Image (spheres, rainbow, N blue to C red):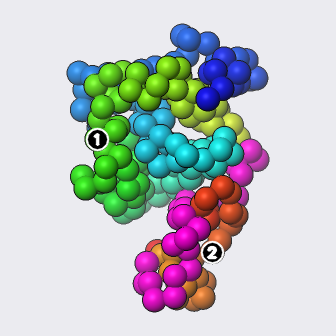
């Protein structure tokens, strides 16, 4: 992990220790600050990816939140997949990020991170994940390496022939799902579902 001080946030200034917000063990997941939840989701979903792959996952979260905010503004209710426009509803919405599912082993890892204020990730790791979330939050859409993607799937599951899920070959061939880019071990896409 790079030290968090090597990451830049708003207006190119370095991230400092005062910028880093740790998980609050006295609060349930849904009450953690939005960027804390984004950093936790990043760890649960993409800790094995290189920096660009991690950034791409954060951009999917950001793109979903943007779409949810637009949906709420237009329709006055939460988006059926992406929530109410908050980071919390975006990442915690059921079946949207597998690391938050009750049967996913990553949920225990994330819960442990909240209990230990991020220390269970290892020395300095929480600061790096949070700083990356902070950096992506401050970036404009021209920095999005996913080209607006809202979904991603591992390459080994992408375009499976007999799979009716959004990432299955039938949905791709019908144009319901469109691949945007491959980064690391993931294919990033948009879908009309």
Give residue 24's quadrant in the image: top left
Q: Are marks 1 and 2 in contact (CB under 8 Å)?
A: no
Which residue is drawn at the image coordinates 51% and 54% (left, top)? 64
Q: Nearer the viewer, mark 1 or mark 2?
A: 1
Between the residue at mark 1 and the residue at mark 2, the CA separation in whole angstroms equals 33 Å
How far across and down, in percent of the image, does residue 60 sit? Answer: 56, 53
How far across and down, in percent of the image, does residue 99 sit? Answer: 37, 50
- Eyeballing the image, is 70 above or below 122? below
Which residue is drawn at the image coordinates 54% and 64% (left, top)? 154
Is residue 121 in the magenta section? Answer: no
Work out whether residue 36 or residue 42 is closer to the camera in this orientation and state it.
42
Q: Would residue 49 be seen by someone viewing this image from the given angle?
A: yes
Task: Say which element carries label 2.
Answer: strand
- Eyeballing the image, is 123 above or below 54? above
The N terminus: image quadrant: top right
Q: Would residue 10 be seen by someone viewing this image from the given angle?
A: no
Give residue 110's quadrant in the image: top left
Near mark 2 (Cα within 10 A), the count class, few <14, some 14-19 or many ≥20, is some
How far across and down, in percent of the image, does residue 140 sit? Answer: 70, 41
- Whichever of labels 1 and 2 marks the residue nearer the N terminus, that label is 1
What is the total number of numbered labels drawn onto the structure image?
Answer: 2
Residue 108 is labelled as 1
Please name the predominant secondary structure of the magenta segment in the image: loop
Work out whether residue 120 or residue 158 is closer to the camera in this orientation and state it.
120
How far across and down, in percent of the image, does residue 4 sit? Answer: 62, 21
Which residue is drawn at the image coordinates 61% and 13% (left, top)? 16
- Please state the extent of the stretch shown in magenta in the rendering: 142-165
User: Is 94 left, or right, of 162 in this rendering?
Assistant: left
Which residue is drawn at the image coordinates 52% and 26% (left, top)? 125
User: Is 153 left, or right, of 120 in this rendering?
Assistant: right
Residue, disc 2: 178
Near mark 1 (Cα within 10 A), the count class, few <14, some 14-19 or many ≥20, is some
């Amino acid at each position: 992990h790079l030290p968090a001080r090597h990451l830049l946030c708003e207006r190119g200034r370095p991230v400092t220790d005062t910028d880093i917000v740790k998980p609050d063990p006295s609060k349930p997941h849904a009450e953690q600050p939005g960027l804390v939840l984004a950093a936790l989701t990043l760890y649960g979903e993409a800790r094995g990816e290189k920096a660009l792959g991690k950034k791409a996952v954060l951009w999917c979260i950001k793109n979903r939140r943007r779409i949810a905010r637009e949906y709420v503004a237009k329709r006055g209710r939460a988006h059926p997949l992406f929530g109410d426009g908050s980071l919390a509803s975006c990442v915690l919405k059921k079946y949207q990020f597998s690391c938050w599912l009750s049967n996913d082993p990553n949920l225990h890892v994330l819960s442990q991170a909240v209990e230990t204020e991020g220390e269970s990730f290892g020395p300095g790791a929480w600061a790096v994940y949070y700083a990356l979330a902070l950096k992506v939050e401050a970036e404009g859409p021209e920095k999005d390496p996913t080209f607006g993607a809202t979904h991603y799937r591992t390459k080994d599951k992408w375009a499976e022939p007999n799979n009716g899920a959004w990432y299955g070959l039938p949905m791709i061939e019908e144009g319901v799902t469109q691949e945007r880019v491959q980064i690391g071990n993931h294919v990033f896409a948009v879908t009309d579902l």
